[in-house]
Amino acid sequence: DLKPLAMSTSSMASAQLIQRMQEKKQELEHLLLLRQLSNHLQTHFDELSEKFDGLVQGNQGIKRIQQYHHPQLYMKLDLQASLKFSFI
């Protein structure tokens, strides 16, 4: 009789389908978690970028003040930097 064999094959296919659906559900959960973590990282990198921009602006302000009070020092440093890069 082929009926029990057909039912057995059908139930195996159904079990495999259920297993595959569970695997896909777990994969989706992992992808959603990765997306959430990625969003958190993006937020942190945006915050770091803003802080870094603030540090750069502050550094540029200090450099301008020092250049005003010690222009000879910066002329010497600029000359050394340009000579250093010209040999590279």
Image: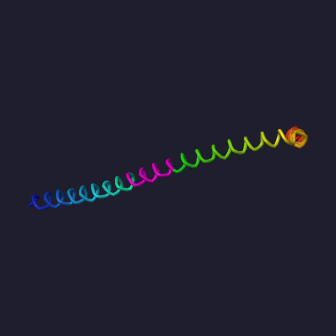
Front residue of this view, candidates 7 and 68: 68
Instruction: Decide if residue 11 is on the left or right side of residue 82.
Output: left
Front residue of this view, candidates 12 and 43: 43
Q: Position of residue 11 (x, y in %)?
A: 17, 59
Q: Quadrant of the N terminus?
A: bottom left
Q: Is residue 88 visible?
A: no
Q: Quadrant of residue 14?
A: bottom left
Which residue is at a point 36% across and 55% down the rendered structure image?
27
Instruction: Decide if residue 28 is on the left or right side of residue 85.
Output: left
Q: Is residue 71 visible?
A: yes
Which residue is at a point 22% across and 56% down the rendered structure image?
13
Q: Position of residue 71 (x, y in %)?
A: 87, 39
- In this rendering, the answer to whether 32 lies above or below 12 is above
Which residue is at a point 89% across and 40% down the rendered structure image?
87
Q: Quadrant of the C terminus?
A: top right
Front residue of this view, candidates 28 and 72: 72
Q: Which residues are magenta?
A: 32-43
- In this rendering, the answer to whether 5 lies above or below 69 is below
Residue lying at the far front in this picture: please name it. Answer: 69
